[in-house]
Amino acid sequence: MSLFSRYILLAMGAVLCLGYAARAATSDPAGIEFFEKNIRPVLADRCYNCHSAKAEKLKGKLLLDTRAGMLAGGEGGPVIVPGDPEKSRLITALRFGDAELQMPPKHQLAREQIAAFEQWVKMGAPDPRTETVAAPVDSYNWTEAKKFWSFQPIQNPPVPQVADARWPLTPVDHFLMAGYQEHRLHPLAAADRRTLIRRATYDLTGLPPAPDDVEAFVADSSPDAYAKLIDRLLASPAYGEKWGRYWLDLVRYADTSGCNSDFPIPDIYKYRNYIIRSFNEDKPYDAFLREQLAGDLLPAADANERDQHIIATGYLAIARRFGSRNAEFHLTIEDTIDNVGKVMLGLSANCARCHDHKFDPIPSSDYYALYGIFDSTKYAFPGTEIYKHPKDLTPLGTPQEAKAIRDYAAKLAELDDRAEKLLRERDVLASREKVNEKNASAKGPTTAPVTQPVRTSKDAAAELALTKEETRQLEMRPPPGETAFAVSEGTPHDAKIQLKGNPADLGAVVPRHFLTVLGGQTLPSSERGSGRLELAQWITDPSNPLAARV
């Protein structure tokens, strides 16, 4: 059984104990004193570098600098079962009782420190650390803000009457003619048939009409000739390619990651094809948005539709990336919120990352409410010069194929990690050997005592070569099936406000919710996911006028 599987099994029992732990944190003075004297100092000294909000690289999504973070646990669930140290993975890790999980790595805590943690868990894990929830924002006059025209419900205005009632063919033409009259302008004469087919074909397909099609249209005197032309152009695959391109431009589509090294993104072409297919199939716009935000969470009629829904979330996965898997990930989320805000709502929401928005009614608390949704989401990651293989791609196909792909990807990830560690070790040992050689030369010949064999840079290099060969052999035997560069559910949690946009300077926790000016809907208490599905529903709800207006 994998480490994460064991985490999940443990989590089922741990949830039952959380209520007791919460009471213990506030009603046990002796326990609080014990925590302050014996537990908090060790956490701060030995754990916060990797497991705190200010960690340069958060490991395993496990936060130990708050009571809520410790009870929630990391990627696999809770790490303590209050009252039962034998079932607490934290204690197992501190004891070095599991070869796969030993914390702190390499340098075990002193025996008396481990004993203190065992005693603390037996006491119910009393912990006085509390987190404040962001107070309601009152820096905006919400009544006035909601009066702005774009936040008003969409209505059908009356069709204006015009002086020349012969020219308008549709209600839209009446509005155009009214505008002409207001500015004392006159519409141009109707285009001849050759001009008309040329304009329509360029507009709908981006291509010139074929000569035979021009002659056929010119010769077609039937009253529905133009309607037939438009139907034919809309049925052309070129229609989706032409108009899908505009959407791909808006959502910053590329076949590479956009980081400094601009690594290729495998399988992202499937998202491009999804967009083209959606235009050609005349997919309803609200469904189009929902699938890109939360396709992996939507019901599907069959396996093919499920795969297409997953592929659609490539929209989120192609957010801006950097050369390291976890470096500056908050900027990946910033890019996600920025694009969702502009493309789907017509709002520059990312201005609220550092402060309450100066122009649009978007406080920072709203920004970090959305941030929590996307930070609870797992993004696929392209390969890099260190991590040669993409991470967290979503398997498609049958359950058997998906399992084989996950196992294959896990093995490649393990080899990538091993290669990275060996590469680092080789370089450190080589540097150390150079220094030792230099010092030995300066001191002259000495008689050294007999010692155990010392690991050298050559040893690490040899292991690195074997790891690379094992990787190469594995690459030659990929399992059948396909993957998607997409997103999936991560560890659900609320985010803290980053003061002035600095992820190292955190403020209050903000419950995940929609923009206040658009209703401020919150996640139901029963929700155990990221909140992307609810966000997709909030954005496409008919009561939100911005999606349709944009």
Image: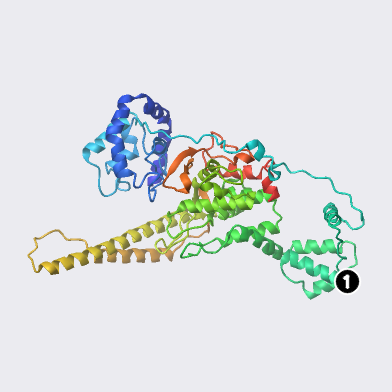
Answer with left or right where residue 307 lies relative to residue 33: right
Residue 86, image x, y percentages: 31, 35
Q: At x 28% / y 41%, what residue is drawn? A: 94
Q: Secondary structure at mark 1?
A: helix
Q: Nearer the viewer, residue 153 or 232?
A: 153
Residue 278, image x, y percentages: 67, 56
**Residue tagged 1:** 219
Residue 202, image x, y percentages: 75, 68
Q: Is residue 524 above or below residue 388?
A: above
Q: At x 66% / y 38%, what residue is drawn? A: 144
Q: Is residue 495 above or below residue 474?
A: above
Residue 338, image x, y percentages: 57, 52
Answer with left or right where residue 249 lies relative to residue 197: left
Answer with left or right where residue 221 lies relative to residue 507: right
Residue 397: which quarter of the image?
Answer: bottom right
Q: Amino acid at mark 1?
A: Ala
Answer with left or right where residue 121 lies relative to residue 366: left
Q: Nearer the viewer, residue 471 or 454?
A: 454
Tag count in the figure?
1
Residue 233: which quarter of the image?
Answer: bottom right
